[in-house]
Image (spheres, helix red, strand yellow):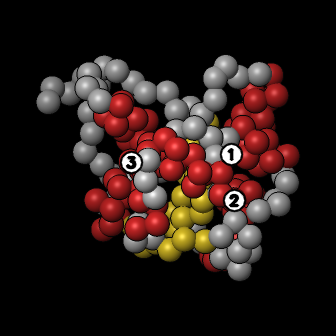
Amino acid sequence: MHKIVISVTGASGSVYAKILLEKLLTVKNQLSDVALVMTENAKEVWRTELGNEDYRQLPFKTYSTTDFHAPFASGSGQYDTMIVIPCSMGTLGRIASGVSNDLITRAADVVLKERRKLICVVRETPYNLIHIRNMETVTLAGGIICPATPSFYSKPQTIEAAAATVVDRVLDLAGINISTYRWGNEE
C-alpha cells in the first residue's frame, strides 16, 4: 500500500495532473492515502488549460501550500512517494536549493531526507543551464526527473492519450501496478 503526495504547480500541463489523479482512482486498492497540494497558480493554469475546476471535486484530501501541519510535512508521516506534476522550474529550483518555503518544497525536502521516492515531472522547453543543474542536483539527492515528454510508439490518437503515456511512466516509477502499453508486447 502506497502513501502518495501529489503536488501540482503552475507550470503548463494541467492535463498531466488531471490524468494522474483520475488513474489513481482506478488503483485505489494499491493506495492507503493520497494527499493533494495545488498552488494558486496551478489552479489558474488548470482553469485556463482545461476550462474547468474539476480539481475541486476530487476525493483526495487537499492541503494548502501553507499547511505545515500536513502529515507529510514530517518524515514521521511515512509517505513513501511524492509526485510533482507538472513541476515548474521555480519549484524545482527551490527543491534543489533546499528552500522549504511552502508545503510542496517542505514535503520534497522530507521525501529526499528520508530516502523515499520524489518524482518531478518537469514541464519546460528548452532547458537553460540553471534548469539542467537543478535537475542534476535533485537527481544526485535521490530524486527522479521525468520530463513531460510523451512517447508515440503506442500511437496515441488524442492529447489525453499522449499525456497518458507520461502519466503511465510516472505510475511505473512510483511502483504502482497498471495496465498500459508495453514495448514489445502485442496488444
Evaluate if marks 1 and 2 touch, with contact meaning CB atoms under 8 Å apart: no
Residue type beneath disc 1: Gly
Q: Which residue is mark 1?
A: 142
Q: Nearer the viewer, residue 54 or 177?
A: 54
Q: Nearer the viewer, residue 65 or 180?
A: 65
Disc number lying in front (1 or 2): 2
Q: Which residue is mark 3?
A: 19
Q: Which residue is mark 2?
A: 104
- Residue at the spot 41% in from the left edge and 66% down from the top edge: 58
- Residue at the spot 57% in from the left edge and 46% down from the top edge: 45
- Residue at the spot 76% in from the left edge and 29% down from the top edge: 131
Q: The residue tagged with tag 1: helix, strand or loop?
A: loop
The part of the image, by quadrant, that contains residue 135 is top right
Q: The residue tagged with tag 3: helix, strand or loop?
A: helix
Assess disc 3: are there few (<14), some (14-19) or many (≥20) residues with their C-alpha within 10 Å of its C-alpha: some
- The answer to whether 51 appears left or right of 179 in the picture is right
Q: Position of residue 89 (x, y in %)?
A: 72, 37
Residue type beneath disc 2: Ile
